[in-house]
Image (cartoon, rainbow, N blue to C red):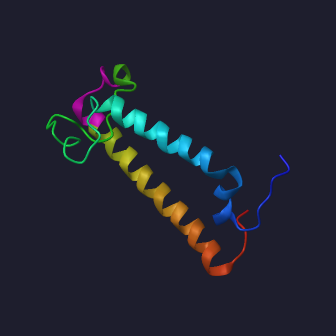
């Protein structure tokens, strides 16, 4: 409240380094938790059974679904993530090209 920045690409600087490091730390802890402590480049891909993106959440919701339904949901999630990446990329580049703040 009351914090405003005209250049939306510079908005992360308002919260400072410690807030950004909290995000990186939380992501690292989650990666460590879901990959049995393997977080170095040498060990993080050592488990061939590891499925990218499978964090073990809501597995009970998929238990009663057929394999076809589960695969459809996985594909929808991938497409949603790709669309979100394109959207944020478009927003960032809009700001770089025009210099206008995002609405």
Residue 95: where, in percent of width, then height?
64, 72
- Asked whether 63 falls inside the magenta stretch, the response is yes
Foreground residue among 45 and 99: 45
- Above or below — where is 100 with respect to 72? below
Image quarter in which the C terminus is found: bottom right
Q: Quadrant of residue 11?
A: bottom right
The magenta region covers 62-70
- Residue drawn at x 54%, y 45% as measured from the top left: 21
- Above or below — where is 71 with respect to 83? above
- Residue drawn at x 13%, y 38% as measured from the top left: 48
Residue 87: where, in percent of width, then height?
53, 61
The residue lying furthest to the front in this view is 18
Judge left or right: residue 90 versus residue 2: left
- Above or below — where is 54 with respect to 13? above
Foreground residue among 59 and 101: 101
The residue lying furthest to the right in this view is 2
Residue 80: where, in percent of width, then height?
44, 50
Could you tell me if residue 55 is visible in this image?
A: no
Judge left or right: residue 38 versus residue 57: left
Foreground residue among 82 and 96: 96
- Residue drawn at x 35%, y 39% as measured from the top left: 73
Could you tell me if residue 88 is visible in this image?
A: yes
Please state the total of marks drawn on the protein image. Answer: 0
Q: Quadrant of residue 55?
A: top left
- Above or below — where is 86 with respect to 16? below
- Residue drawn at x 58%, y 67% as measured from the top left: 92
Judge left or right: residue 43 versus residue 59: left
Residue 61: where, in percent of width, then height?
38, 22
Q: Quadrant of residue 77?
A: top left
- Asked whether 64 falls inside the magenta stretch, the response is yes
């Amino acid at each position: 409240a009351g914090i405003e920045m005209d250049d939306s690409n510079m908005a992360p600087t308002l919260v400072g380094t410690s807030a950004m490091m909290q995000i990186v730390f939380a992501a690292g802890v989650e990666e460590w938790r879901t990959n049995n402590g393997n977080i170095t480049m040498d060990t993080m891909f050592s488990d061939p059974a590891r499925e990218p993106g499978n964090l073990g959440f809501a597995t009970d919701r998929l238990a009663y679904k057929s394999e076809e339904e589960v695969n459809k949901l996985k594909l929808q999630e991938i497409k949603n993530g790709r669309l979100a990446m394109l959207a944020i990329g478009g927003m960032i580049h809009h700001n770089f090209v025009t210099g206008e703040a995002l609405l």
